[in-house]
Amino acid sequence: MGVLYLSVELALDLITALLGVILMKRAHDNGPKFWWGCIALAIGAVFAWENIGWLLIVTEEPEYCFTDLLNMEKMLKWYPMASLVALFPLASLFPGYLTARRTLLYCLPALILTLTGICYLAFDGYLTPVCSMTDVFLYWNCWDVKLRCLIFIFSIVTPLAFFLYPLLTRKGYRQANGMMYVFIGFMFVFLVIYILFTLDISYFIFNLFGATAIVFTLFFSLQYLKRENPFSVCLYDPEKVAAPVLVPSTLPLFLKIDELFQEKPLYASPHYTIKDLSEQLQVCERCLSEAIKSAGYSSFREYMNHLRLDYFRQLVVKYPDKNIKELIFLSGFNSRATFYRNFSDKYGMSPLHFQNQEKKKM
């Protein structure tokens, strides 16, 4: 564990924390994006603090050695955060489902065991030295060894169940995309590294855990920076799709919203906001956001992008002689990069390819 490696990781930690702040500010009514920003900020800040500490240790004691397995402090840092992160596939596929109450219920095992561990460290504090798996069996009668094993098992099983559960349930209005499987694959790898990190004493595993954690957080922070929901695509069609089992239906209000936009393409203005919609319908912004999420959209912005993409397709048919750049701005997008990314994500082809297809039909 060298000074150069720790310095590079410290720089990545600070970048991750900064991205977290940016995501929180840009989230608006997108709950998962806001909470991912909070997680990125927390992970970046905690790892930065730890790496500063390790830089001081390595500077003073270059041959520092790890001595214990089932380190309670490591597990207590991992367990609550891993449980929250593992809920993102569920939050992605079922927008609006994870209310504060439901999130608390999902994370209850992690909170109980984490608080138990913290109380033990605060009021007792003695940890039986465990330097090998043989020591686990040797000191099994010690209460702290049993507690550490319990936390270790639950800190693996709980996150694993959370990020696999939504893929085994009925599909709602959204479908998992390739990035969802990248996320789940990353979680599997991260879980394996965590197991090794908790049961193995080596510089390599220690460094691998830190690097994986920060690369994982940084990579998906960038995904959230580019997309409203990087892990799934919305398939909503009120005529074909029934309300999903997991999401409380507020579709009557959503259908009223949708009817308004079918009558008037208000979304063609790039500056149209949920505040404007609230004033027009005389409905609070929170209720509008909940209704939009009940239809499978992660946020008002994603819903607007969906309408603008559909409007772009109509404009391509209506104005076959106009170029794509003109049609992009006519449909309400003020960023070509955002338009191209959203169009290819939703339809799996480039706008030019779609335009050429429509011209061949004429």
Image (cartoon, rainbow, N blue to C red):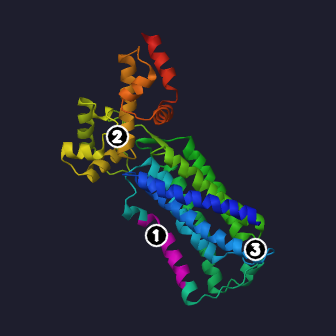
Which amino acid type is marked by label 2? Ala
- Residue 320: in magenta span: no
How many labels sit on residues? Answer: 3
Q: Nearer the viewer, mark 1 or mark 3?
A: 3
Dividing the picture into quadrants, the one containing residue 192 is bottom right
Give the labeled residue for mark 1.
108
Which amino acid type is marked by label 3? Thr
Circle number at residue 242: 2
Q: Earlier in the sequence, mark 1 or mark 3?
A: 3
Which amino acid type is marked by label 1? Leu
Left or right of 40 on screen, residue 326? left
Q: Is residue 132 visible?
A: no
Residue located at (56% from left, 51% from top): 220
Region in magenta: 104-119
* Crowding at mark 1 (Cα within 10 Å: few <14, some 14-19, many 20+): some
Residue located at (66% from left, 74% from top): 53
Q: Main secondary structure of the magenta part?
A: helix
Give the labeled residue for mark 3.
59
Q: State the quadrant of the C terminus.
A: top left
State the image coordinates of residue 82 (x, y, percent, origin top left). 55, 63
Residue located at (69% from left, 85% from top): 128
